[in-house]
Image: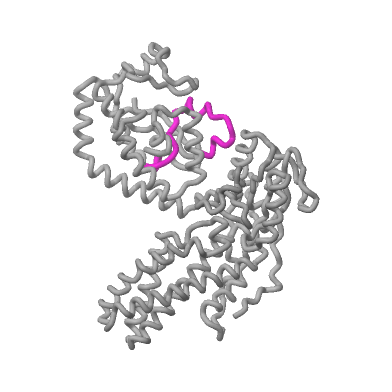
Amino acid sequence: MSLKLNKNMATPSASQRRSRTEDGEARPVNCFGPDAAGLDGQSSIPLEASLFERAERLKLSPSARWPALRLLFLLADAAALATGAFLAGLFAALDAAPTAVFAAAVVAMWIGIGWLVGVYAGDDLRAWATGVPTTPRLVITALSVTWPAYAVLVQVHAANASAIALLAVGSGALMSASGRALARGFVHRKPSLRHQALIVGSGMIASQLVNKLRTQPQFGLDPAGFIDDDPHMPEEAQVPHLGRLSELSNVLQRHSIDRVIFAFSRSGHDELLRGIRDARAANAAVDIVPRLFELLDGVPGLVNIGGLPLISLSVPRLDRTSRAVKRALDVGVAIALLALLAPALLLIAIAIKLESPGPVLFRQRRVGRDGNRFDVLKFRSMYIDADQRKAEFAALNDVYDGVMFKIHNDPRVTPIGRVLRRYSIDELPQLINVLRGEMSLVGPRPLIEPEAEALDQDWHARRLDLRPGLTGPWQVSGRSDTTVEEMVRFDYSYVAGWSLARDVELLLATVPAVLSGRGAY
């Protein structure tokens, strides 16, 4: 079966390939053009091939390559599992209505479980080039779907329910693998979905990388040029020198670069680190050729292009769906915790009120998402005159960064407050901030205004892309023992690589960190 490409489809221009706002920020590009509407179903070829023939009409751009591939995977899986279910129903002589119910249930379960397992996740080069890394997840999905499929067949009173379930899911899984192979073959042959790659560095390794990109077309990368402060690229590489590392941001925008590969540049550590941050700020994926790469062949997690391993950093994605899922998690867990802990919170409030005069809750101005100010809530853990006595104890400050003020065994802390602080119980009222939408369960540390004003580098602002969190990387990595510089670095890495799985991981890691009391004072 051959797939015919639309010869009349024009390759998008540079302006079409990446849509940008006036301030230079990349906007999501819709992978569906107006031609996607009104596709007719008149075709005599099999269903999956028909789906890919229809996909020919979609107007695609490099920024839409992953949404397009995921959509094709969804369509291929739905067609494969529905076909498998109908074949199994035909084999078992089921009536039309039970067969339709069974097919719909199998498709829904496969897509739902597959989404959770991760068969539609992953935007790295390995997942684009081959389906091998996804095979174990497909097997897990098939095994997970078989039992509920059997339960559905029992409900519709099918004979030999176990055999029918195995036949439906097994045949559907095999057709799904074939459909996914067709999907990859389709996207690999679309020039409009190829990424423009910029090489940072020059010399033998950079030249080898250029050659491997050209001889390994399944990765979908075209070398657009290289930048280096000391260019020494061999002539046989035949790639243009586009500027210096300090000009990276301008080169990315001027040449519509989708991916930046760092390959042994002679620039210093700080310059390379700044370049990586600039690339990620421009929504470009980043790959790094590691030092001593000759010893890393076969190491899990590395992308291998013709024997040259790369460490890949995907484009950070904080779309509306991701934010909605994160917000739903925040609200659900915050409501559950407040309901569960209400009696304990009441007892703590009474104890604070009886121990020393002053309000139960302490309010402090903090800087939140997008620089918005809000009042963070805590159980009061200090005496009422703590702020007035701050200057008195300035010489005892254990943090020497000129910004934070932390004292071990702070005499301004009440006896009950010392216990509350050790186990972070004083921060539980911030669940109210979470419900208000001012904070999240997991996120960057909410800074007080002087701390926020001390952050003067451009990449520091990236930490404000998400709501500040009740916990986060800083909480599980040292709490009060963490300096401002380390905390900002933790926050940047968290925001740049955000995922729901990472949030769950940090929530689980917070429990032992809090119970141990390390870094709390």
Name the residue at the right extreme. 235
Residue 440 is one of the magenta-drawn residues: yes
The stretch of residues the image draws in magenta is 436-463
The quadrant holding residue 88 is bottom left
112 or 465, nearer to the observer = 112
Question: Residue 108: x and y, percent?
Answer: 38, 69
Residue in the foreground of this view, choosing between 35 and 318 = 318
Instruction: Check the image and tell me how it is coloured.
Output: one colour
Quadrant into which the N terminus falls: bottom right
Is residue 432 at least partly visible in the picture?
Answer: no
Q: Quadrant of the C terminus?
A: top left
Any part of residue 43 in sight: yes
Q: Position of residue 510 (x, y in %)?
A: 35, 39
Who's the residue at 59% across and 61% down the image? 65
- Residue lying farthest to the bottom in this orientation: 93
Question: Where residue 35 sits: x, y (%)?
Answer: 61, 71
- Residue drawn where x is 54% and y is 35% of the image: 460
In the rendered image of this protein, does residue 60 appear above or below residue 251? below
For residue 343, above or below residue 93: above
At horizontal 39% and vertical 32% (from top left) the residue drawn is 375
Q: Is residue 400 magenta?
A: no
| Identity of the residue drawn at 63% across and 59% down | 62
